[in-house]
Amino acid sequence: MTPAELSAAIRACLQAAVDAGDLAVAVPGEIRVERPRQREHGDWSTNVALQVAKQAGRPPREVALLLAARLGEVPGIKSVDVAGPGFLNVVLDAAAAGEIARTIVEAGTAYGRTDVGAGHRVNLEFVSANPTGPVTLASARWAAVGDSLARILQASGSSVAREYYFNDHGAQIERFAMSLLARSRDEPPPENGYFGGYVADVAARVVADAAAAGDPDPRTLPADQAQEVFRARGVDLMFDEIKASMRAFRVEFDVYFHENDLYEHGAVDRAVARLRELGRIYEADGAVWLHTTDLGDDKDRVVIKSDGQAAYIAGDLAYYLNKRERGFDRCVIILGADHHGYVGRLMAMCAAFGDTPHENLEVLIGQLVNLVKDGQPVRMSKRAGTVVTMEDLVDAVGVDAARYSLARSSVDASIDIDLDLLTRHTNENPVYYVQYAAARLAGIVRNAVEGGVRRDDAFEPALLDHETDAVLLAALGEFPRIVAQAAELREPHRVARYLEELAGHFHKWYEHTRVTPRAGEPVTDGHRTRLWVAEAARQVFANGLGLLAVTAPDRM
């Protein structure tokens, strides 16, 4: 019996009580069941009696006792206890609990997928770092979190487009171009320019590319023309490098959106026109303003300045409208901690278009990440000079450990990435702990097959009678709920923490049960049935790690 099947059984019992006139309530469309924190409280627990008691006009415990009597008659349920003010604690019989193993094996890679997000078209924008340098460690965190969230949302039935907003319009790009030109002439960059060693490398490539194409040496051109050559070619080279870094980090974007397109194709004008139709635009002091103070913003915003130039928010307006016009009903943006004060105006912007803040537009704010080695923070990159890059982290620990360590903590929390810890092959290293469980399961399956244990010869879940069987099976049954919850709350770290907990349950199960008989012992149906459990656990580790784009190795 899966958690979903148990939920349906509880709902059926509640409906039967209503039909019999025992209760007068509206039966919820779905009833949530969860694993109790303490194993002795049962396999599963639900608080449905507390939820409907007020509507029924009866004490929660009385409602729970009524439901417990009906639920105890359901095949596969061994016992039902009423705890505290009205919680229902359910114990399944071994056969019913064990069926989850067959369910998982037969579902394969589809296990854990749900349709809770079906019908939603999600535009998920993340990283969006300016093409003025290598991908920083902070951006690497958003790459790991954003891509993992996209995978989780897709597993929950949503249609997802990963989008990178390519900032090729503005002062930072001009400073980058000036820095390239200066380094190409062996001059120091301007005071507010870019100083990393990569700047000289990119500048040299711009010069080499011009020579290879038979174009004039850009260093000899007049200042304005030279700067434009270094801007155009330098940005392209830097962005190509960013794309390559993302691919190497297992992140593939569906859309690379160029900011410059908003201004070249009239998107800002369309956004202003739409807001004017909605009564949100007014003019004062020669400028065009967006009226948002009644929508939660601390002040109205200038959209078009008195000199006719678009203000910064104009691009936000145009970009958001563009996403909505492309058919996305959920626009999710992951931003760094320095953008925290920007959320209010973005939500006011969403409301100005007649949309629902925190529904049509969601903003996730992430905190900082630090790299630590030998107990000391790593301050600078050998290449970038001023910051630590994604490349530094990957070079030190590999893609698996980098992605897992960046995605396993809530984005609300600052994190320290300990390079020494991530290179250890010990249980203290979380990614090793989880991957080792996956590899160990693969070895168990190999050894069982070599020992003559054939899964297809028998499946007798009633034989799964050890306490660790029940604990492991219950944990495996939780996976779809964890994925759905991670999608709903936009929290990929829930999958990683679940896998770590699952690894602990697996290791205890392995200590107390056997899949392969000892030397001289015959193969029994107990061995064959536990092979189903091992393969089910192996599948869940593979599916869970896949949502984080981390490999589930066969050997370690």
Image (cartoon, helix red, strand yellow):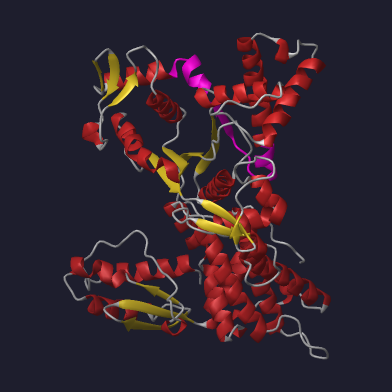
Q: Does the magenta stretch include residue 446?
A: no
Image coordinates of residue 83 in percent, x first then y, are: 32, 82
Image coordinates of residue 480 in percent, x first then y, are: 51, 61
Image point (79%, 75%), residue name: 447
Residue 35 in the image: above or below residue 404? below
For the view shown, which residue lies furthest in the top direction? Answer: 222
On screen, residue 221 versus residue 111, left or right, reads: right
Image point (40%, 27%), residue name: 321
Residue 460 visible in the picture: no
For the view shown, which residue lies furthest in the left direction? Answer: 57
Q: Quadrant of residue 535?
A: bottom right
What range is drawn magenta here? Answer: 243-267
Q: Quadrant of residue 470?
A: bottom right
Residue 412 visible in the picture: yes
Quadrant containing the C terminus in the rendered view? bottom right
Image point (32%, 39%), residue name: 344
Q: In which quarter of the image is residue 452?
A: bottom right
On screen, residue 15 versus residue 544, left or right, reads: left
| Most foreground residue, 506 or 74 | 506
Image point (52%, 49%), residue name: 149
| Most foreground residue, 365 or 61 | 365
Q: Is residue 253 magenta?
A: yes
| Most foreground residue, 119 or 361 | 361
In this rendering, the count of numbered labels is 0
Residue 386 in the image: above or below residue 273? below
Image coordinates of residue 64 in percent, x first then y, are: 29, 77
